[in-house]
């Protein structure tokens, strides 16, 4: 299904006056509006191909119907999101959940929908039908060299798929670790993993980046072999300058200061990419910004400050991606909410009065420092984000158009109510 341009324009017309007065009110206080609008236009968030269906937990899954049945339909779904919000211009594929059998056809379809291919993701945390050796006791860390080789070969295959599509990065997330004390020799597990990653790294094209994603726990509950940013940074540093750490917001132990982690990784030139989601307890994969919006703002504040300090391009020098699971919401509505939350928070971070903040820091003026941050965080920037969308041909209110056009009902009619998308 596609949403006709004129439908979006019709909806925009109906709320244009209200939008314009909100926008004018807001920008009266913003000195560099044009620059901010340009940055918002450039900023694109990749949508994971595995999050277009209903998620589940080990207790069950409650599908809502109309899920994409294949990669083509997933691309259509993301195209739809992008048409509405003009900020979801990329797709991230997980192999083998989504194998692009016919690369040129998939590439053309993505281009038609205005989409690029973001990072490719490998999967050595599940056994696939017909797979020779099992990952039950790990993949790249495995005591058996043959299992390690299988995991390496899989990653190299994923790179090949990515090259055909024009992707330029590989994200490696390993579930490797142990469930009980004594199960694993930590040092050997690290060494095996490093050597395996080195082999994959050697197959990486020059223009590519490798993202080493860490996660504190789950599915292993005693130790994880890439368990935190320290371990990831260790691997990335030993691998070389094409390897970076990837931060997934849900992969930390409770109360971790993620904004500080981000600041230091940026300082070291080793922050590669981001997986956005939100959590209350563990790797909950909830909608980004739904539980801890101020934390998200503080993270974006460090991202903007740290990238500017290095003269980096906000839009293209890091990989931006959503990594969420939707158990009770319509996945497409959830993704619209996620992208909106990211854009709002990015806009707020762009509003921080940097000069005043530095001054406050240098004077140990704790109160002013807090005021500066909260001034930006408490600014309602929704009209700014909407204006950027409007200028790019998107919807003032993507969710409203999605509902008015009854997209889900159409998708159910088209695809059926019992379809199951591959993924989480
Ligand atoms: C993991 C991790 C990875 C994602 C898988 C599906 O927890 O977040 O990024 O690829 O889930
Ligand atoms: Mn992730
Ligand atoms: Mn995760």
Image (cartoon, helix red, strand yellow):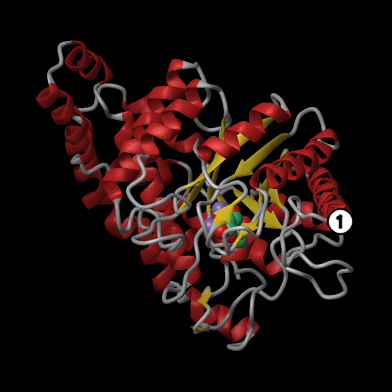
The answer to whether residue 258 is above or below residue 323 is above
Camera-side residue: 115 or 16? 115
Residue ID at (57%, 72%)? 53
- Report whether 228 appears left or right of 362: right
Which residue is nearer to you in this view: 277 or 330? 277
Which residue is the site of mark 1?
150
Which quadrant is home to the N terminus?
bottom right
Residue 319 seen from this side:
no
Instruction: Give coordinates of residue 384: x percent, y percent.
Output: 31, 40
Residue placed furthest toward the left: 367
Work out which residue is located at the far front of the displayed protein and give it: 182
Kindly state the secondary structure of the residue where label 1 is placed: helix
Q: Is residue 162 left or right of residue 400?
A: right
Res 219 quadrant in image: bottom right
Q: Residue 93: horizontal and vertical position, in percent?
A: 69, 56
Q: Is mark 1 within 8 Å of ligand 1?
A: no
């Amino acid at each position: 299904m596609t949403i006709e341009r004129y439908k979006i324009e019709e909806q925009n017309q109906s709320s244009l006056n209200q939008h314009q007065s909100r926008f004018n009110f807001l920008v009266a206080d913003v000195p560099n509006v044009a620059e901010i609008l340009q940055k918002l236009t450039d900023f694109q968030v990749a949508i994971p191909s595995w999050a277009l269906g209903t998620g589940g937990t080990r207790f069950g899954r409650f599908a809502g119907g109309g899920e994409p049945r294949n990669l083509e339909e997933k691309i259509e779904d993301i195209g739809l999101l992008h048409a509405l919000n003009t900020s979801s211009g990329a797709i991230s594929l997980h192999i083998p959940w989504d194998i692009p059998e016919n690369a040129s056809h998939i590439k053309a379809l993505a281009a038609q929908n205005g989409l690029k291919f973001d990072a490719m993701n490998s999967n050595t945390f599940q056994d696939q039908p017909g797979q020779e050796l099992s990952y039950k006791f790990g993949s790249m860390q495995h005591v058996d060299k043959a299992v390690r080789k299988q995991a390496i070969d899989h990653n190299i295959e994923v790179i090949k798929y990515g090259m055909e599509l024009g992707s330029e990065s590989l994200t490696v997330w390993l579930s490797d670790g142990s469930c009980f004390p004594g199960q694993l020799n930590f040092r050997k597990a690290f060494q095996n993993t490093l050597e395996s990653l080195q082999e994959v790294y050697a197959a990486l094209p020059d223009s590519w980046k490798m993202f080493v994603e860490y996660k504190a726990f789950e599915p292993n509950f005693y130790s994880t072999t890439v368990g935190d940013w320290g371990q990831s940074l260790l691997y990335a540093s030993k691998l070389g300058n094409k390897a970076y750490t990837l931060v997934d917001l849900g992969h930390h132990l409770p109360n971790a200061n993620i904004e500080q982690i981000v600041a230091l990784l940026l300082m070291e030139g080793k922050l590669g990419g981001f997986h956005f989601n939100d959590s209350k307890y563990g790797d909950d994969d909830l909608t980004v910004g739904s539980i801890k919006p101020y934390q998200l703002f503080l993270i974006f504040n460090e991202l903007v400050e740290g990238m500017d300090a290095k003269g980096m391009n906000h839009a293209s020098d890091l990989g931006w991606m959503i990594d969420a699971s939707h158990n009770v919401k319509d996945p497409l509505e959830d993704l619209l909410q996620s992208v909106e939350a990211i854009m709002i928070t990015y806009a707020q971070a762009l509003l921080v009065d940097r000069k005043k903040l530095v001054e406050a820091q240098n004077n140990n003026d704790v109160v002013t420092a807090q005021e500066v941050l909260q001034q930006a965080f408490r600014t309602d920037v929704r009209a700014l984000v909407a204006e950027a969308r409007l200028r790019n041909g998107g919807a003032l209110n993507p969710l409203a158009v999605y509902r008015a056009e009854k997209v889900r009902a159409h998708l159910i009619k088209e695809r059926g109510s019992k379809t199951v998308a591959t993924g989480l």
